[in-house]
Image (cartoon, rainbow, N blue to C red):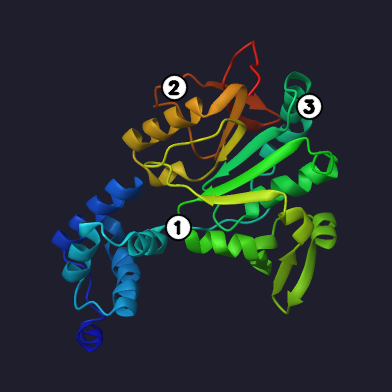
Amino acid sequence: MFKKLSERSLLELTDEEFKKFSDLIYQLSGIYLKDSKITLLSNRLRQRINERNFGSFAEYYDYIRKGEDQGEINQMLNAVSTNETYFFRSEKHFEALTEKIMPELLKKINRPIRIWCAGCSSGEEPYTVAMIMNEKNWLSHRLVEIYGSDMNTDVLDEAKKGLYDVKRLRATPDYYKDKYFKKYDQDTYKFDEQIAGYVKFFRQNLLTDSFDDLYDVIFCRNVMIYFDKPVQQKIVSKFYDAMTPGGYLMIGHSESLYFIETKFVYEKIMDAPVYHKDDSVIRKV
């Protein structure tokens, strides 16, 4: 079967096959693939098909559609998800978090502040949060808990290893680079293991999984651009229900909830766009 596919390895999915896979991926994850992504999807699925020795795209589709092999379903979703990020991306959100949001929440909540980075990819965002929390001594005093989740199990494994090439550190200030990273080899750096230990990672499908905890701050930046409006609506509603009153949602600078029905209230804090779950009474959790 491997030889059979190798002989046609330059071929793409047919339009019909692309439609079947894109519909299935949407159903499983909420990821919306435009027709222009047919070559990208062909290339990424072909790798899985070769590794598992399926004879064709159609055979692989039938296997996935049965839903009996959750491990392979996860691997397919890993293959089609996009995971480009870096440390200190859009730093205005981090300034708003440390200078305004955290001091406000610490005055109102008599427990550790829970911060969740949803769609955290290989860990750069929650690790950035951990570094800036450490600079305020909020980590050592156990005043904050940091969580990172992603649907892609491969990138979560990368996050736990804490190894990053220089490209991922391109926006990292020298102070943080010198303090929290050690050179691992010529082009790779190892993140501080002690600080990494403060971040708890877990797999989470934002569309299909329930959100089992309550959070005070949720980062979900540059993630919802891969979803259409109905899926965005559902996920934002789930975020609202998973957030304590008075909490904050951070989305990407290029994203907006303008066309989504939501109870979140838009605010701009230190030039950072944020959404607030407005409530005058912060209940204990």
Q: Residues within 10 Å of mark 2 (few under 14, many from 20)?
A: some
> In the rendered structure, which disc, 3 or 1, sits on the residue that comes first in sequence?
1
Residue underneath mark 1: 82
Q: Are marks 2 and 3 in contact (CB under 8 Å)?
A: no
Residue underneath mark 3: 103
Q: Residues within 10 Å of mark 1 (few under 14, many from 20)?
A: few
Which amino acid type corresponds to the residue marked 3 in the rendered image?
A: Pro
Spatial CA span between label 2 and label 3: 26 Å
Residue underneath mark 2: 262
Element class at badge 1: loop
> In the rendered structure, which disc, 2 or 3, sits on the residue that comes first in sequence?
3
29 or 284: nearer the viewer: 284
Element class at badge 2: loop
Q: Please say whether residue 221 is visible from this viewpoint.
A: yes
**Quadrant in the rendering for residue 123:** bottom right
226 or 127: nearer the viewer: 127
Q: Is 38 drawn above or below residue 143 in the view shown?
A: below
Q: Position of residue 9 (x, y in %)?
A: 26, 81
Which amino acid type corresponds to the residue marked 1 in the rendered image?
A: Thr
Q: Residues within 10 Å of mark 3 (few under 14, many from 20)?
A: few
Q: Quadrant of the C terminus?
A: top right
Identity of the residue drawn at 47% across and 18% down: 263
**Quadrant in the rendering for residue 275:** top right
> In the rendered structure, which disc, 1 or 2, sits on the residue that comes first in sequence?
1
